[in-house]
Image (spheres, rainbow, N blue to C red):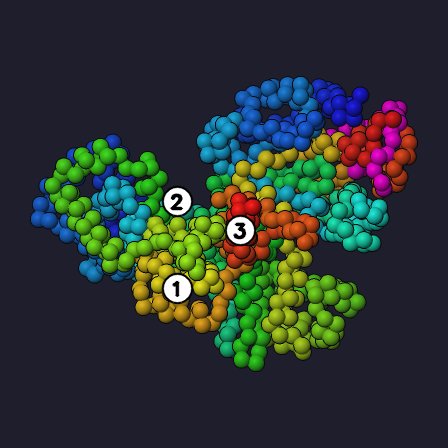
Amino acid sequence: MSNIFDLVKRYPWLPSLKKYSYIDSKDDPYEYLLELFSKYPNGEIQERVFKFFRAAFENIEYLSGHKNDDLNIYLYLILRILLYILDNKPISNRIANLYSKITNNELLKEADATVYEICQDLNLKIKYYQPPINYGINISKDQKQILETNFRIHYADYLKLAANLRDEYRKLVNNALSEGYVFIQKRSLIRLIQEYVRRKFLNNEDDEGKSSNKFKKNLLKIQEFKEIYDNILSHWELKKEEFEYNFEISFKKGSNISKDFPPCIKDILLKAEEGQNLTHIERLFITFFLNALDYPEDEIINVFSTMPDFDKKKTEYQINFAKRKGYIPHSCATLKSLNLCMAVKYNDQICLEGYFSKKLDTKKTLAHPLFYIQLKQYRGSKKIKKLED
Amino acid sequence: MSEKNYLKRVFQAYYKEKREEIPIITKLEKREFGFIPWDKEIMNRHICFKFTEDLKQYLINESPKHVYSSGASYLQPDNLDMDKKGYQGCDLIIDIDVDHFYTPCKDVHDTWYCKECGKTGKGIVKKCTKCNSIKTKSLSWICEDCLKIAKNEVFKLINNFLVPDFGIKDKEIKIAFSGHRGYHLKIENKKIRTLLSEERREIADYLTGENISFEILGLRQDRSNILGLLKENIGWSQKIIKKIEEILTTYTNQEIELLLLRYGLNRNIVKSFINSKRDFQQIISNSKQNIWNLEGFGIKTWEKFLFGIVDDIGAEIDGPVTIDIHRLIRYPGSLHGKTGFKTQEINHDELDDFNPLNENNERLDPIVFKSKENIHKLQIIEHDVPETRIKGKKYGPYKKGDIIEVPHHIAVFLLCREVAKLS
């Protein structure tokens, strides 16, 4: 069993952080930061915070020399304060992504019992077994492997963390569920904790909406803090340019058809625009979709340029590979099954209600997102014709 | 007096008389209510009641055609803006309605007629069998058989999924006969209340087997072999193998043939399956091997076979109802405007004996307008009205223009179904 304070030092996002009065909701952040910088006058805080941002902007997914000391807690708190006042979704997504990935790597080194303690602290309903329990077998090439695990997680907690990851193998229907608990391997459980941590960084945005200017101005009066803030912004400006950050999807034989995109595509593009880390399936779908519309390679690469793990060469290769293979975008039914259908979220009448087919004299539902564009364009051309008439 | 006014008065009299018996749901003051009046087919929603007496008085005063309340609770249930209602969580709602799946009795009691050529027929059709016009009007009916099928789906849902897999306790499950063609289940559990739509979709998929991946469950091609699923694997694999075992051990060859043809397998493949029945039975009962090499069966055929099995195992639920956290459901104890039957709550242990169209237990009887003396004269206004069997007595079938004399509960039923008018 670990000392909970040790755990909090390693994982400051744990709810138990509150017990150690590193920060209290009643604390004035200004006073708090002032005291903190005076406690560490040698610039160590600035260096570690900036190292973090630099790594995030460079798409590095690990940090060398990561320390689990007292300062690790302050680093976490300052990162969250900074993201709040920066109020920049692409930056928040990059930091959330990097921080959660580092957490994942750290957690993988932990003993099973420690992972269990962490889950308890997170108020996840977990059953921990020592020795592990069996939940099936896997036979491959005459090799029989017993499937066993130390962990079972309540399906409600599982769904809250896994439903958005959208991997087919994480779907509840494809998992071992019994008596309200999903049998889960340590690695998969840690992946869920990673998701918890990632969201924790993004929840900042939901607190009060846009950060208050007064709050920001006040904090920027602290010289050390201002130094970090300015440094981050100037570095980000450079990076933005380096990525040739351009999010206009405007190509289609000279005309802009992005206004005709179905909600499922709009939603992914919006996420990408905000620098959110798209899931594997979202990346495939958007690539197949834009390929099917003959978008130029550069335009598609641009979509991915905001990803926290963007690699231009890899992206280029994957787009071309998909094109060569002629992969077609997923159908509406598949998108629904993968929770990628956004008809309800966007209250899109075409997707929700279908369209009227003159030929069949009946209402039909949409089966494919590509058809959505055709339909929109057909309706658009009709309108223009009417105007011309 | 118009039929609608008449029915409104009948409903009003009921609510007045049964005022004290109207059940009160949990968190009543935090639920949104919706009502469909008799005079127009629109729902008045965003209504809330602070006190139970207010709801009862509303039912007596307005006596709506349909009464609904939300599965969700809100800080301000009457706020017109959904985003400002202050959503606090939602019970898990599961709707089983025979409208959404095929039952053989529909071929007997559901009717249709073509508005173009006047042809009439039985069952469900997409277009007229004579002139191919899609301008057909269909009339779906109810019988003890289809309601029994719906009830079996409730048992399947509770006994095969909710209790063993989801660990939901019996006392958390509230079952209600909808008052027409099915049942509602409401699961009141603190943890479930926090789940969002996407998370509920995963539950709906689990209950139906939608979007299952046989590849993830183990079905794959390994060189010249096809590797299948294993009974030892908890979850859907186990359910599938148990179902296959049941088919292989309890079905006759003829029944297997019909089943596999229904799954879409061709006759030669069905024949091959029946010939290899014993071998296959041995394979799936042996945990040491999972080689599913049967003549004519490739991965695609196995998938087709397994999709058929999954379809039979899964519960017939109306998915969108489960997923939608702002959905309103019929209020227990209220009257259904399409039948005049009561939305009746039933305990799990009472469900087996429950027969909505001929219930002996007065407390559970959804047919509330029974009267032997009160006879009504009605005129049939629908082309073909199927036979109705209620309380063990047969009424109909009727043809358009028939003048009939029926007891009160049948009159209310036929008027609510809008197939007759007061004569």
Q: Position of residue B209 (x, y in %)?
A: 59, 56
Name the residue carrying label 3. A381
Q: Are marks 2 and 3 in contact (CB under 8 Å)?
A: no
Q: Position of residue A380 (x, y in %)?
A: 52, 49
User: Horizontally, is B153 left or right of A243 in the view?
Assistant: right
Residue extending farthest to the front is: A389
Q: Amino acid at mark 2?
A: Asn
Q: Nearer the viewer, mark 1 or mark 3?
A: 3
Q: Position of residue A38 (x, y in %)?
A: 10, 41
Is B383 included in the stretch rendered in magenta? yes
Principal secondary structure, stretch drawn in magenta? loop
Name the residue carrying label 2. A123
Name the residue carrying label 1. A296
Q: First in sequence: mark 1 or mark 3?
A: 1
* Front in this rendered view, residue A293 or B146: A293
Q: Are marks 1 and 3 in contact (CB under 8 Å)?
A: no
| Mark 3 residue element | helix
| Mark 2 residue element | loop
Task: Give neighbour class at mark 1: few <14, some 14-19, many 20+ (Cα, 10 Å).
Answer: few
The residue marked by circle 2 belongs to what chain?
A
Q: Which mark is residue B187?
A: none
| Mark 1 residue element | loop
- What is the distance, in whole Å, between disc 1 and disc 3 at their CAs? 24 Å
- What is the distance, in whole Å, between disc 1 and disc 2 at their CAs? 48 Å
Q: Amino acid at mark 3?
A: Ser
- Asked if badges 2 and 3 are on one and the same chain, I answer yes
Q: First in sequence: mark 1 or mark 2?
A: 2
